[in-house]
Image (tube, rainbow, N blue to C red):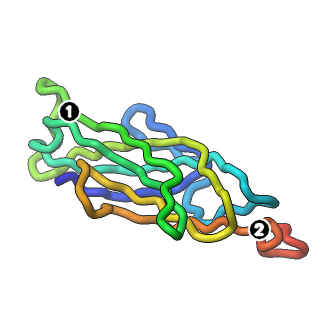
C-alpha cells in the first residue's frame, strides 16, 4: 500500500519538475474577522510507492469536515502509473511522488475542522490534520496584530 511521507497545509503549493513548492506552510489555525468565510488553502504531500505500486494508478481523497462530522467537501485525484519504460529508483528505494491541491476551504463557523487523507478508498484515514477557525481578534500581539 502507498505510504504517506508527509502532508502539510500551506497558502499555496505546486509541483514542478518532481519538486513540491510551498508558500506559507505549516499552519493549523485560520484567522478570519467574520464567519461564514472561505480561505484558499494548499495541501502539499509526498506519497511513497514501491516499484510494483508505482506501476498501477492510486486514488488520493481529501475529506474536509466540521467537528460534528458535516462534510464540507471531498476531492479526489490520482497518481500513477509510472511509465513502464521510465527510470526506476535504486534497489530498495521507493518512488517519491509529490502531490499538490489548492482549493477554497469553507469556514462556516469558528471552531475545529478536520482534513482527512484517504488512499485507494481504504476505510481508515492515512493522515488527519485538525484545523481551527478563530476570530481575527485571537491573533497574538496587541489588539489582535501579529
Q: Give the left or right position of residue 104, taking residue 2 as reference.
A: right
Of 51 and 143, nearer the camera is 143
Q: Quadrant of the C terminus?
A: bottom right
Q: Are marks 1 and 2 in contact (CB under 8 Å)?
A: no
SS of the residue under disc 2: strand
Q: Residue furthest top?
A: 85
Please state the horizontal and vertical placement of residue 57, each as a whole percent of the image. 21, 36
Q: Quadrant of residue 140?
A: bottom right
Of 19 and 98, nearer the camera is 98
Q: Residue at x 23, y 41 (%)?
A: 58
Q: Residue at x 78, y 73 (%)?
A: 138
Q: Residue at x 54, y 63 (%)?
A: 66
37 vs 143: above or below: above
Q: Give the left or right position of residue 30, taking residue 48 as reference.
A: right
Q: Residue furthest right?
A: 143
Crowding near the residue tagged with mark 1, few <14, some 14–19, many ≥20 C-alpha atoms within 10 Å? few
104 vs 7: above or below: above
Q: Residue at x 36, y 63 (%)?
A: 127
Which residue position is annotated with label 1?
A: 81
Counting residues from the start of the chain, the first of labels 1 and 2 encountered is 1
76 vs 117: above or below: above
Q: Quadrant of residue 36?
A: bottom right
Crowding near the residue tagged with mark 2, few <14, some 14–19, many ≥20 C-alpha atoms within 10 Å? some
SS of the residue under disc 1: loop
Q: Quadrant of the N terminus?
A: bottom left
Please state the horizontal and vertical placement of residue 55, each as a whole percent of the image. 13, 36
Which residue position is annotated with label 2?
A: 135
Amino acid at each position: 500500500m502507498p505510504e504517506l511521507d508527509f502532508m502539510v497545509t500551506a497558502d499555496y503549493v505546486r509541483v514542478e519538475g518532481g519538486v513540491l513548492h510551498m508558500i506559507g506552510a505549516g499552519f493549523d489555525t485560520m484567522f478570519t474577522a467574520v464567519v461564514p468565510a472561505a480561505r484558499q488553502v494548499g495541501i502539499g504531500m509526498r506519497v511513497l510507492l514501491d516499484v510494483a505500486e508505482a506501476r498501477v494508478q492510486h486514488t488520493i481523497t481529501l475529506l474536509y469536515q466540521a467537528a460534528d462530522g458535516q462534510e464540507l467537501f471531498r476531492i479526489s485525484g490520482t497518481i500513477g502509473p509510472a511509465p513502464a519504460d521510465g527510470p526506476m529508483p535504486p534497489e530498495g528505494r521507493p518512488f517519491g511522488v509529490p502531490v499538490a491541491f489548492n482549493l477554497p476551504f469553507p469556514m462556516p463557523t469558528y471552531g475545529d475542522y478536520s482534513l482527512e487523507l484517504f488512499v485507494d478508498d481504504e476505510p481508515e484515514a492515512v493522515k488527519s490534520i485538525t484545523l481551527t477557525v478563530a476570530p481575527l481578534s485571537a491573533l497574538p500581539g496587541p489588539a489582535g496584530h501579529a
